[in-house]
Amino acid sequence: MAMLAIVLFVVLFQATVGLQLFRLGSVQTSIRTTSVPLLRETRQIARLTTNVVNQTTLLENDLTTGELSRLREKYHENEQLIDQVLSRISVTNLDEDVTHAFRSSRREFSQVNEELFSNQFKQRAQEARILRAKDALQLKLTELLDLLDQLVVRSTTTILAPFKQPEIGEAGLEAYLVFAGEIETLNTLRSGVLDVSSLLQHSANEQNIDALNNNLHFRLRNIGRSLVLLDASEERATLAQVASDMIDLLSAEDGLIGLLKRNTATRERFDVLKRAQVAAVDEIDKRTNRIVAGANESFEQQIDNARGLTETIMWIGIATTILVLAGIFGVNRNVIRNQISQRFTVLTEDVVAISERDYGHRIRVDGRDEIGTIARALDTFKRQAEELQRSNAELERFAYVAAHDLRSPLDAIQDLARWTLEDERAQLSETCIENLELILKRSSRLSALQSDLLTYAKVTEMDASAEILELSDEIGQIADLLDPENKFNIRLVNDPGRITTYGLPTRQILLNLITNAIKHHDRTSGQILVHYERTAKGHKFTVEDDGPGIEPRFQDKIFKLFKTLQSRDQVEGSGLGLALVNKLIERLDGTLAVHSNAPNQRGSKFVFEVDDLEDVTTSVRIAV
């Protein structure tokens, strides 16, 4: 009955989960097909609206007609894009009142912008007509000045003619006075014409058009009064006609003053439109923000719905899991307690005993289930570990005995060859001497190999007790031992003073690495630096040399037994130095790496790290 109740509850919960999953799928579809596109479209609306506002702001500049046309084209393109986006938004579930209000504000904004564009085109046309009117007036002024200059020359010639005669009568004097008055009038006319020209040249930025109109008419009336003072003649008639043409160009409906007034009215209308545009921009900003806020609200609501459904499913799953686990626990409690838990406890004790190298311990668990299989596998592992320990011990013993027993025969061979050379060198042939020297050289190499092999075999017996090292003294002693002639600059960088670590192994590692750097250096002198760094693990050493380096393709081979990168006739070595370093680092549970980029760059770096044993007070042995 209990199991039946559990099954019914599980079925009920799973049905509820299925319903929630269906609702969650609907929400996710809505987010993917509606909320996300709506959010994207509203943001595009905001961006396009900003572009339109920026474009219409350019109307404040004095743009040419061509620039206005191009700006208007870009403006209309953005307007069309906004219409397209609004059409897509209209089919979504965004509040219709919000989009309607935005469309209304945008229509007002567009009407103001269209009128602003029209106003600017009108201003450019009026400015062109004003410029043409000024040019026409200037031509008339120039014509009037030319006529006046001709009259002044003629009158001056007439005045000076009587003075060429020996005597001047009363008639000549009277004529002189008449023409002198005419010259004065002509100069007055010329001065008035220049005043009019000056007013026209400085009217480009004239703000008070009425004042300009009054000044121009005042000057033209003076010119008319001065013309009356001249005697009636064909020239005066011509001057009067030119002056009349100037008045028409100035005061006619399409004259300069009228054009200036209409242009001022157009500019004033532009200012009114700009104020209306600012108000429209504020309104459209509010509407745009409402659209974006509505899209964000819709998106966040859908996300909240999805989050709520997900949490509901999660809690249903947790409740189902707890119920199932409680049922299983209640039904199988006795089975787990009596048949599994007790056997696991015994098996755990067996595993702990074997991990402590108690290979004589008997496995006390059996059976045909999974626990019995684990117990049989553990028994097999115990026998294999015991056999491996025995094999390793025999192998190391053999290597030690073999290396040790080779010492006497090798010494005998070296002594015999050396004594023969010392006592009988004069009676021996050169070939015999070369062969004996070769025997000495090869036996010395074999002796070095035997010594290194013996050291390698005794690694597991090396004392690894915690020891305080004065690092600078250790490096100095190694330098004196390996380089008594001081050909190499061997020194410590970043001296830490005293450190506590594995004493003998650390000395051996540093000795082998520095020996390797000297032995494989391609020059008679060089530099070998030992860098020290304190790390979270312990002590980090870097042995750096400036030798030829090691190519990357060889770097994984140099730590293997009897591996050398050069012929033993070129470099004396057994091929065990770096292998011994690697074995020591492994036994100390440290790390070892080599860094070199030969032949592109000289030098090599051997980096190893060992533990800090400052808190260790008892001697430890390296694990086999």
Image: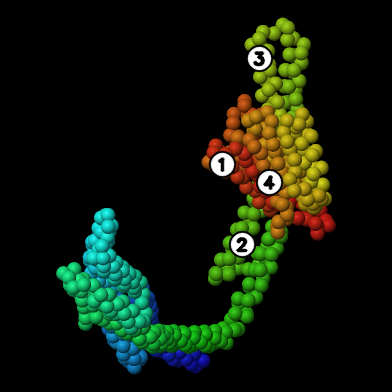
Residue 353, image x, y percentages: 70, 63
Name the residue that disc number 2 marks. Answer: 378
Q: Secondary structure at mark 1?
A: loop
Tell me the kind of residue under disc 3.
Answer: Glu
Is label 3 in contact with label 2 (beta carbons under 8 Å)? no
Which of labels 1 and 2 is toward the front? 1
Tell me the kind of residue under disc 2.
Answer: Leu
Please tell me the numbered disc located at residue 434: 3
Cα separation between marks 4 and 1? 16 Å
- The quarter holding residue 405 reads top right
Cα separation between marks 4 and 2? 42 Å
Residue 392, image x, y percentages: 67, 46
Please tell me the numbered disc located at residue 374: none
Cα separation between marks 3 and 1? 40 Å
Q: Secondary structure at mark 3?
A: helix
Which of labels 3 and 4 is toward the front? 4
Please tell me the numbered disc located at residue 597: 1
- The quarter holding residue 295 reads bottom left
Figure label count: 4
